[in-house]
Image (spheres, rainbow, N blue to C red):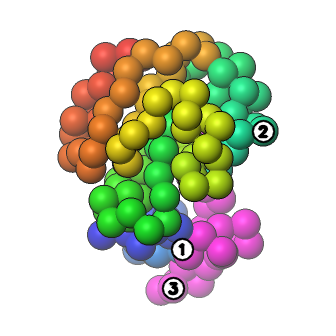
Amino acid sequence: MNNPGSLIVRCPSCGTKNRIPGTKLHDRPKCGKCHSLLPAPAPGSKPIDVNDASFSDEILNHAGVVLVDFWAPWCGPCKMMSPVLEQLAAQWAGRVKIAKLNVDENQITASRYGIQSIPSLLLFKNGKHINTLVGALPKSDIERQLQAIL
């Protein structure tokens, strides 16, 4: 399983899977086996952090589908969802924007959407709230919901 904040990148030269820590994604990492440069991750292949101030620009003004994870750092189920959201961001890059909003630090937006339980995943399409999923859900359930609104 991926560690939160890391990404698995396959080397185009030798095919080896390399785990790249999130802190190294902006460097050009090298393959651990053959030392070739690894491809840069695609834009949108990682969840973005949003807050009360950026929510409107990043989510409500986005033309397309957005999945927003309302979470908190002390929440066990939220921590379980983190690698799932990392995987979804990488798999659905270019089709779905994945965002995370810390409810402890952004209570205005959490209140606006009536967040009472976390994790809560809100789906938006062209700035309109379409659906809410509550709790730690299997990746397949989330993918089904994304597919339904694309």
The magenta region covers 21-47
* Residue of label 3: 32
Secondary structure beneath dot 1 equals strand
How crowded pointer 1 is (Cα within 10 Å; few <14, some 14-19, many 20+) is rated as some
93 is higher (above) or lower (below) than 22: above
Q: Is residue 100 visible?
A: yes
Residue 51: x %, y % from top left: 69, 44
Q: Nearer the viewer, residue 96 or 108?
A: 108
In the foreground, 15 or 145: 145
Q: Which mark is residue 20?
A: 1
Quick check: 105 left or right of 15? Answer: right
Seen at 47% across and 86% down, the residue is: 33
User: Marks 3/1: CA distance?
Assistant: 10 Å
The answer to which quarter of the image holds residue 43 is top right
Mark 2 lies on residue = 53
Nearer the observer, disc 2 or disc 3? 2
Against 43, residue 6 (above or below) is below
Establish if 111 lies above or below 27. Answer: above
Q: Earlier in the sequence, mark 3 or mark 1?
A: 1
In primary-sequence order, the first of circles 2 and 1 is: 1
What is the secondary structure assignment of the residue under circle 3?
loop
